[in-house]
Amino acid sequence: MQLSNIIQVGKLLDRPEFATYITILGRPIVSEIIRSTIDQYKNQIMETQHSVDLDELTSQITQQLHFVMYEKTQPVINGTGILVHTNLGRSPIHQDIWDQAGETVCRYSNLEFSLIDGKRGNRMGMLNRVIRAYFGAEDNIIVNNNAAAVHLILKTFAIGKEVIISRSEQVQIGGGFRIPDILEESGAIMKEIGTTNITTLDDYLNAITENTAMVLLVHQSNYFIEGFTEQVDPKELRKHLPEHVMLVVDQGSGNQSPLLRDETTVSYYEKLGADIISFSGDKMMGGPQSGIIIGKQEYIQKIKKHPMMRVFRPGKETYALLETLLITQMNDKNSTVNRTEWALKQPLSWHKSLAEELAQKIGHNVKVIKSEFLVGGGTTPKAKYPTYALEIQSKQSADDLLTFLREQPTAIIGVIHQGKVLIYPISLLSSEYDYVAQVLAELKDAQ
């Protein structure tokens, strides 16, 4: 009898072991994995000449499906002590904000419809007013991320023209995004000034020509320079730039909080007279991934009319979430909807109490230790804030323990410090406390 008559995809798909996988992954994907595993199994049989064992084959298929399950976008628990974790979805969106915005997003809405006259409306709607109230500036526009914002600004104002940028600000962020590459791709001419550690006002002013479109100040994001350094005061730079040269700021994080050390606020640049400022809507704001561009109306209007604006504009979910988030924060300064800002306000005694409370629930296997947490997401790379962490006491190696935690029904992501696995309560959501405590309490039985 031929193997194809014994091993059939259709029959295997109907086995109860695969029902859950079909529900979660989709029948076509499960079918594809079954088919590819069958092909491998057939080759294995031909080489070893042993008989068909359907239980063995089912086990191999299940293993492959299990691996694919890890690829699916799913919740994880951030125990790393990094609040804005780029690899873990950056800032979590508060459930209340998501639910409120969902009332609009999950129905038809007036996204581009005027309820006043029944004609086509402005896609930004009231969000334009909300952003002006929160950040200032004459006008604003939203795109799908801050990289797109920088690219669109350059495309609008600097094709074939010079853009002056300090050598210390030619940064590369995650995923290989490099400022010099973006400048080149946009058609702008990069004019590098200064040195790695020192850039003076004269460096900027001496580089200006009739073909200079702008000075671009870029947030250094994920690194810092210490020692013999000098950077230009943006106020002095603004004061001395000639009229034909724009001052454009890639602020980066969207920070408006004075609590974040060494991180200049968006409003600071707006008040000193920057022509355009761009920043992320998700990092320090705790909103959806987006790029927000604010500035003088004459410049924002040109950006809005650029042909590439339609390419970079976000979906209705982004508008609804940003509008709901910012209105909530303006109405309640003590709101917890911006988790990062809320965390920075908590006294050290709160950090210690939370860690001790979790340790008590666990009962064993953990030790409360002093440590530090980071904001993350390319903000304030040298700023660390005091907190307390849970040091897991285990006979397993640190690497094996991290793997064990990742393999939980909801993965728990920890870090290794001095050979021990740490879980940071400050980066856990309150809804996750009991689950983490339960997993760690049962750890002794799993060893």
Image (cartoon, grey):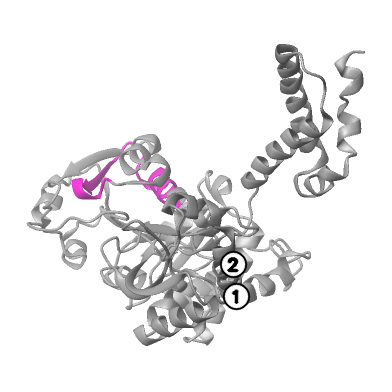
Answer with left or right where residue 423 lies relative to residue 289.
Answer: left
**Residue 373 point in image, percent of width and height:** 36, 68
Residue shown at 56%/77% (left/top)? 430
**Residue 38 point in image, percent of width and height:** 77, 25
**Residue 286 point in image, percent of width and height:** 50, 68
Q: Marks 1/2: CA distance?
A: 12 Å
Q: How many marks?
A: 2
- Which quadrant of the rendered structure holds the C terminus? bottom right
- Residue 5 against residue 128 in the figure, above or below: above
| 107 vs 300, nearest the viewer | 107
Answer with left or right where residue 313 lies relative to residue 390.
Answer: right
Q: Which mark is residue 434?
A: 1
* Amino acid on which disc 1 is placed: Asp
Give the SS element for disc 1. helix
| 229 vs 419, nearest the viewer | 419
- Residue 334 against residue 82 in the figure, above or below: below
Asked whether residue 340 is in view, the answer is yes
Give the foreground label among 1 and 2: 2
Count neighbours of disc 2 (C-alpha within 10 A) and say few if under 14, some if 14 to 19, many if 20 or more: some
| 93 vs 271, nearest the viewer | 93
Residue shown at 13%/47% (left/top)? 194
Residue position for label 2: 442
Answer with left or right where residue 311 lies relative to residue 102.
Answer: left
Instruction: Determine which quarter of the picture holds residue 55.
Output: top right
Instruction: Determine which quarter of the picture holds residue 392.
Output: bottom left
Residue shown at 63%/51% (left/top)? 73
Q: Which residues are magenta?
A: 149-170
* Amino acid on which disc 2 is placed: Glu
